């Protein structure tokens, strides 16, 4: 079961790849500054995952207006995620949890999904400026998108 609302968010640093090279993105860098939305997704370049990331991307200004940083997270390599971000013209970072440490810490790792071992569950977390989870959602159905209205409500609350 994914971490619950009211829980201190496990801190992490993950790799993101862009035109400037590999960059370390640390959750704690947002503490005291802005809210954070973490969107775990199973695998890059799958139709539902691309729909999810593109949906968020098309409304990214709403997140920015609410002073929220958005990160997509999967167990794919940072190089694969860079390509996905370029193809979809994403305006937010995709983070590589290649070693599966963060998906494990947030308890959102499938043991087996269609024969793939250790793939992130589609999950969403909203973390406040103090580092506390104020919204948590995780699904065992990889086709089920997060409740974006509930995510927005948590950001506005």
Image (tube, rainbow, N blue to C red):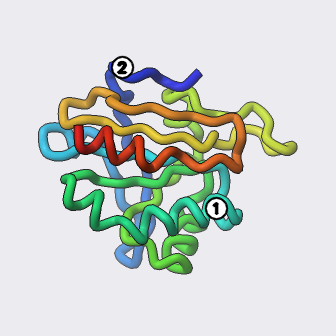
Query: Is residue 29 something that shows in the picture?
Result: no
Quadrant position of residue 150? top left
124 with respect to 47 (left or right): left
Q: Residue furthest right?
A: 115
| Residue at (62% x, 55% y) in the render | 76
Disc assigned to residue 7: 2
Quadrant position of residue 99? top right
| Spot occupied by residue 61 in the image (x, y as percentages of width and height) | 28, 67
Where 79 sits versus 110, above or below?
below
Which of 37/12 is in front?
37
Where 108 sits versus 153, above or below?
above
* Quarter of the N terminus within the rendering: top right
Which of 155/72 is in front?
155
Mark 1 Cα within 10 Å, few/some/many (few <14, many 20+)? many
| Spot occupied by residue 33 in the image (x, y as percentages of width and height) | 13, 45
Q: Residue furthest left?
A: 32
SS at badge 1? loop
| Residue at (62% x, 59% y) in the render | 49
Query: Is residue 96 something that shows in the picture?
Result: yes
Count of marks placed on residues: 2
| Spot occupied by residue 80 in the image (x, y as percentages of width and height) | 60, 67
Disc assigned to residue 128: none
Where 83 sits versus 9, above or below?
below
Q: Earlier in the sequence, mark 2 or mark 1?
A: 2
SS at badge 2? loop
| Residue at (50% x, 27% y) in the render | 105
Residue receiving disc 1: 44
Q: Are marks 2 and 1 in contact (CB under 8 Å)?
A: no
* Quarter of the C terminus within the rendering: top left
| Residue at (66% x, 60% y) in the render | 48
157 with respect to 92 (left or right): left
């Amino acid at each position: 079961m994914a971490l619950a609302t009211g829980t201190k968010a496990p801190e992490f640093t993950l790799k993101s790849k862009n035109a400037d090279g590999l960059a370390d993105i640390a959750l704690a860098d947002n503490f005291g500054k802005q809210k954070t939305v973490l969107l775990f997704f199973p695998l890059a370049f799958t139709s539902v995952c691309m729909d999810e990331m593109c949906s968020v991307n098309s409304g990214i200004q709403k997140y920015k207006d609410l002073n929220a940083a958005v990160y997509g997270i999967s167990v794919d390599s940072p190089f694969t995620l860079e390509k996905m971000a370029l193809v979809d013209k994403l305006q937010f970072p995709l983070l590589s949890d290649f070693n599966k440490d963060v998906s494990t810490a947030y308890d959102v790792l499938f043991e087996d999904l269609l024969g793939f071992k250790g793939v992130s569950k589609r999950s969403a977390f909203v973390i406040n400026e103090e580092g506390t989870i104020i919204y948590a959602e995780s699904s065992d159905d990889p086709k089920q998108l997060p409740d974006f209205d509930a995510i927005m409500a948590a950001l506005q609350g």
